[in-house]
Image (cartoon, rainbow, N blue to C red):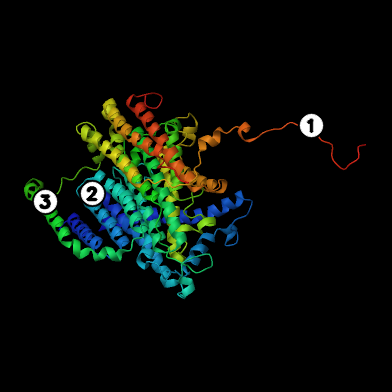
Amino acid sequence: MSFERILFYLFAAILVFAALRVISSRNPVHSALFLVLAFFTSSALWILLEAEFLAITLVLVYVGAVMVLFLFVVMMLDINFAPLREGFTRYLPLGAVVALVIVAEIVLVLLRGFDTLSGGAPAPKPADYSNTRAIGEVLYTDYLLPFEIASVILLVAIIAAIALTLRKRPGTRHQDPGKQVQVRKSDRLRIVEMKAEPRAGRAES
Amino acid sequence: MIELLIILAKIILIVGPLMGAVAYFTYAERKIIGYMQVRLGPNRVGPKGWGQPIADAVKLMFKEIVVPAQSNRYLFLLAPVLSIAPSLAAWAVVPFGDGLVLADIDASLLYILALTSTGVYGIIVAGWSANSKYSFLGAMRSAAQVVAYEIAMGFALVGVLIAAGSLNLREIVLAQQGGIWHWYFLPLLPLFLVYYISGVAETNRAPFDVAEGESEIVAGFHVEYGGMAFAVFFLAEYANIILVSMLVSLLFFGGWNSPFEGIWGLETLFGWVPGLVWLLVKTSFFMFTFLWLRATFPRYRYDQIMRLGWKVFIPVTIVWLLVVGVAVVGDLPPWWG
Amino acid sequence: MLDNYLPILVFIAIGIAFGVGPIFAGFILGPHRPDAEKLSPYECGFEAFEDSRMAFDVRYYLVAILFILFDLEIAFLFPWAVVLDQLGWFGFWAMVVFLGILVIGFIYEWKKGALEWE
């Protein structure tokens, strides 16, 4: 067995274990951290497939950004998880149906696609091969329309996020640095001219 | 097997000096800030206080690691590991000279960005697992801050990529060859400033140290840590500072290229200096700047930090990306003529 | 290419060892004299009167979501930056459109006050 194959089975085992712990651990923070581990090991598997750019982007986007949001939510929502667990049996049939549908879909795809995919491991690339360059050469030319649509989807996501979560709290104070810089002396200070007054209680001499 | 041993030896060659640098950087920090505040700094242990970092390390080793009763034991002890592993592993792709690199991968810059973005887990997990209000506040502040500055940092890096046309750190340095006026800090000056300031913010250093804020939340996310568990956080923070300094030298200041390249007379006069020395001199300067900033500026207020990250840095970088893009595609002189 | 990633795998393992090792050493070398006061969470001299895990302001989630969106945008920028010189003006304008649409979103969140902290 080649070294790469050993690594593959090692990472795959960690990935499956982490994925199982995501749904089986009682503490939601543990679940989220196991999901981080799962993303990390899948990234390692992608590197074994020579998909360098995608693997590192997976870490950058999912581990570095998406999971931070997940952790924020499970750490800060301060939910009591006992009542949530009570609903488990009630939702079990529905969940099982959804899981079955997903499994069926995966099986359908794999059954048809496996013949073309079973060419074994991808050909090893030379050390100076640039995965990023290869993606860049097609993404902004051949796949221009999907690329621009992606930006529209991101725009929709920005607007949706703001519409859903932005709450103005009354009574908050904001600092406007633009206004602060533009303040002139005349706005704040009034110089009054008046005659000098003789000091009281002292004889003039 | 032999291959693995060679890799291990190389890693020790990187991590060993790095740990030494961290130890004496803490000494330099106390000494330099001491002098800036007209104090002497540590001067008791060994001649001129040279033994201070070793004494500190030994002391920390024999201190009790207190695990708070209401904390989440495993996560509490996992947090320092989550903090140091990425800050060390990022060094795998840092080139110290032309060809002097442990792992010469094509996407090395992307790799560093990805790894440094995972460093935030150490802080969040530490803050949450300790079950203390101060550490939780520190973790939340730090996470939101790191998140805001990482975007500015990413945009600034994209500018460097456009200029160099490569993701590989070695190729980025090679693209800056040919004299000090070819170094990217000139054509990419706004991006250099954004990157360095974001680097200071990402490492939670003064004046962006609201995550620790000794006078507000008494050391923030690692308030409950003691002994070696604290020392590991400390190592990670300082390894990150040195990493940011070295990246700034590599990306914007020509890496191991001599500053006298192309200057008649001086070039031959300093021709014998190895490239690694130039790189280390530049890195030391930026490490010194970290201390200089800390001794000079008062702490930023939290809303000001968020404003700087989102409302100043991101617009500046987007505009400058387009400027660099036009210059590169249009082959505009003086840099891309 | 995979050969270049082996050192990284080893380095990550070493990094983890560098975290676990000192903590382990600290547990062996350091004393263990726990008492109730020492193990209680740090407060300003009084008893901790409530659990420290409290609900936080919703704006933290908003910042995190916006961060994800901009991080994705950066992921799209990386391959573009590398091949820009080959793509020429066509590639440049493709990205101007992409960034332009996202800048609309950025201006929207700015005007809505999503970036304001008090």
- In the rendered image, is residue C1 in sight? yes
Look at the picture and state if B105 lies above or below B68: above
Residue B60 vs residue B103: left or right? right
Q: What amino acid type is highlighted by mark number 3?
A: Glu
Residue C100 point in image, percent of width and height: 32, 31
Q: Outermost residue toward the front?
A: A170
CA gap, disc 1 and disc 2 = 88 Å
Nearest to the eye among marks 1 and 2: give it: 1
Numbered circle sitting on residue C2: 2
Numbered circle sitting on residue C12: none
Report helix, strand or loop for mark 2.
Answer: helix
- The residue carrying mark 3 is A105
CB atoms of marks 1 and 2 within 8 Å:
no
* Circle 3 Cα neighbour tier, 10 Å, few/some/many (<14 / 14–19 / ≥20): few
Q: Chain of mark 1?
A: A
- In the rendered image, is residue B234 in sight? no
- The residue carrying mark 1 is A195
Q: What amino acid type is highlighted by mark number 2?
A: Leu
Residue B322 point in image, percent of width and height: 36, 30
Residue B5 point in image, percent of width and height: 30, 58
Of the pair B90 and A117, the residue shown nearer to us:
A117
CA gap, disc 2 and disc 3 = 32 Å
Nearest to the eye among marks 2 and 3: give it: 3
